[in-house]
Image (cartoon, rainbow, N blue to C red):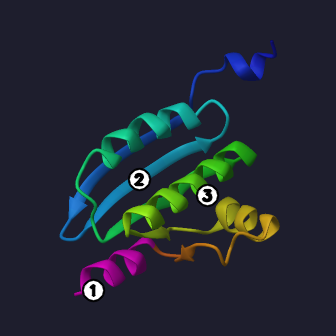
Amino acid sequence: MSSEANRKPTLSVTSGLSRNAIIMRLEGELDVNAVPVLREHLQRIWELPPQPFLILDLGGVAFCDSLGMSELVSVLQRCEARGTRLLLGGVHGVMARVLSITGLRHAFEVFAKFDDALRLAVAAP
């Protein structure tokens, strides 16, 4: 087993509610070691009644590998099945490059600033 697989997750996830949106802030590395942390947090979100919006604040994500991107696609699919709009806020730097390189930039509703994503959710009826 490689030392990569033995590393501790370097992702912190916090969440809260804002009117008609669940907001999750991710900080650190969204990689093979962090996906279980994100999934555990998401499980609690999926147990709540569906909200119109789920906003992921990715402004603090410093690294994202293919498993991290795969998890974001899974979140998108789960949101679509629940009738929830997934908004990615704070997308710049690493996350902007990864979304562009993978061709997934247009699969998500992406905002360079978290506040722009929040404003859209709050303004929705």
Mark 2 / mark 1, whichever is N-terminal: 2
Give the x, y percent position of residue 117. 41, 76
Q: Is residue 86 above or below residue 61?
A: below
The quarter holding residue 3 reads top right
Residue 101 on the magenta segment? no
Mark 1 vs mark 3, CA separation in Å: 24 Å
Give the x, y percent position of residue 9. 56, 28
The residue carrying mark 3 is 73
Dominant SS type (magenta): helix
Give the magenta-colored segment's residue range. Answer: 114-125
Instruction: Pick the residue in front: 22 or 111.
Output: 22
Q: Amino acid at mark 1?
A: Ala
Q: Residues within 10 Å of mark 1 (few under 14, many from 20)?
A: few
Q: Which mark is residue 124?
A: 1
Give the x, y percent position of residue 16. 25, 53
Q: Quadrant of the C terminus?
A: bottom left
Q: Is residue 112 above or below residue 38?
A: below
Residue 116 on the magenta segment? yes
Q: Is residue 115 left or right of residue 68?
A: left
Taking the spot 62% from the left edge, 69% from the top edge, the residue there is: 92
Q: Which mark is residue 59?
A: none
The residue carrying mark 2 is 25
Mark 3 vs mark 2, CA separation in Å: 17 Å
Q: Residues within 10 Å of mark 3 (few under 14, many from 20)?
A: some
Q: Is residue 21 above or below residue 5?
A: below
Mark 1 / mark 3, whichever is N-terminal: 3
The quarter holding residue 118 reads bottom left
Q: Quadrant of the N terminus?
A: top right
